[in-house]
Image (cartoon, rainbow, N blue to C red):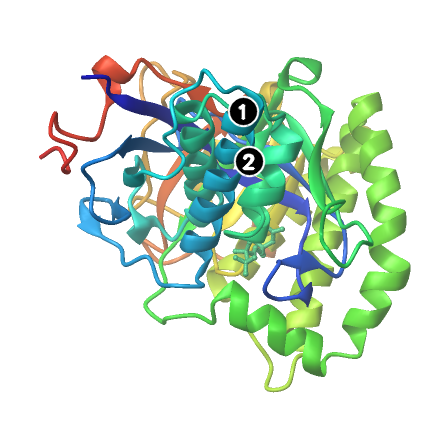
Amino acid sequence: MTVYQATVSAPVNIAVIKYWGKRDTKLILPTNSSLSVTLDQDHLRSTTTSRADESFERDILWLNGKEDPIKEGGRLATCIGEMKKLRKQYEDANPNEPKISSYRVHIASNNNFPTAAGLASSASGFAALVSSLAALYKLPSSPSELSLIARQGSGSACRSLFGGFVAWEMGSATSGTDSLAVEVAPREHWPEMQALVCVVSDKKKGTSSTSGMQRTVETSTLLQHRIREVVPKRMEQMIRAIKDKDFTTFAEVTMRDSNSFHAVALDTDPPIFYMNDVSRAIIATIVEYNRASVAAGGPVKAAYTFDAGPNAVIYALEKDMAEIIRLVCYFFPQGVSFEDPMGVFPSGVQSGVPEGFDVNVVKVAETGSVSRLIHTRVGGGPRVLDDSKETLLAQDGSLKV
Ligand code: DP6
């Protein structure tokens, strides 16, 4: 009996030009283009196994070990349905291929980072889902073609179909066929680009991206300015900065765009606050760090960015990352768990501030206000794994325990 199955992993991406607002909520078509850096799957990833079998009675998805209902007309059902359609087209064009497009599927998906870390898993999750079905179905589709489907799971997921530096072109067609992800540059173009994810503790349940951005679309006048005037220019500047490996421009545009996104959140009625006092203290730390560097005749060395929550992601080049980790550990002490997967501190991280940094600008935070630091770098796109070793499904197609 042939087993039709594939296992794939997909990366997380963190936008430097933010997606915020939909012009079509069903197809997930954005009100502006966006751009992100794909993070390394060696450190952060979603892994998904998909299997098609004639004996399966219904489509089932297990997320982190628990069944996640596939609601009719919902985002999961849309993505699975679209992938089955592509398989059907492939079977029609290749009559010798097995007719598995009509079979039900069992899908199991895991993230290697805890949801409690407050990291968005929907981008890597939907990218892994679509990529595993594409591998199962042996589709000849390009990453951009698959991004059209991942986009309908979660907008930002379309950018996780590529590694490196990725743009989501908003497109103009009402059908959404030109709203897709494209590679701006592969990871090899600028491998020195690294990221430090600062997990900021937050007890409150925040406003989800999906509902928050819709409220912004409905009520914010500032959003219209962002869509028309701000983002189009920044997309051009950012693409140029990446092509030229111009970190100063990359950092300035990244920080300004994060601020602009949080400004339109604040301009929403009622207002939405994603950052907290710890987030703002991280901003103050990075601003002072850059000021001290520039005052000493050096370059801008770090860029902060925040998504729909209090966590910071700091982008910096490899040569400056050790100094930045020491700085973050100084102002956000102890509770920080730093795993150092890239072996930057062989004998343990020592906190400290670089020369010229004015320590009075930032107050040392309460212990544990940054609970975890994840040091990673720019990474590649989805990977097809060795299914015999990495499968998340048992032999009979149920969830492997
Ligand atoms: C702030 O992609 O999570 O992270 O399309 O409704 O699923 P949906 O939203 P989602 O929004 C991400 C918003 C953001 C910015 C970004 O990633 O570009």
Name the mark on residue 381. 1
Name the mark on residue 167. none
Q: Please tell me how crowded label 2 is: few (under 14), some (14-19), or many (20+) other residues with Cα within 10 Å.
A: many
Question: Assess mark 2: CB under 8 A from ligand 1?
Answer: no
> Quick one: quadrant of the C terminus?
top left
* The image quadrant in which ligand 1 is located: bottom right
Q: Amino acid at mark 2?
A: Ser
Q: Secondary structure at mark 2?
A: helix
Q: Nearer the viewer, residue 98 or 236?
A: 98
Above-or-below relation of 272 to 97: below
Above-or-below relation of 185 to 151: above
Above-or-below relation of 223 to 17: below
Q: Residue 374's x, y, as percent?
A: 41, 35
Tell me which corner region of the image, top left, top right, bottom left or bottom right, holds residue 253: top right
Judging by the rendered image, the residue that carries numbered circle 2 is 160
Q: Pointer 1 and pointer 2: residues touching (CB < 8 Å)?
A: yes
Q: Residue 81's x, y, as percent?
A: 46, 48
> Quick one: quadrant of the N terminus?
top left
Q: CA distance from mark 1 to mark 2?
A: 7 Å
Q: Secondary structure at mark 1?
A: loop
Can see residue 289?
yes
State the residue at coordinates (56%, 72%): 212
Tell me which corner region of the image, top left, top right, bottom left or bottom right, holds residue 53: top left
Q: Nearer the viewer, residue 399 or 247?
A: 399
- Left or right position of 188 against 376: right
State the residue at coordinates (49%, 32%): 87
Q: Amino acid at mark 1?
A: Gly
State the residue at coordinates (23%, 24%): 391
Q: Residue furthest bottom?
A: 270
Q: Residue 258's x, y, as percent?
A: 67, 54
State the residue at coordinates (11%, 30%): 396
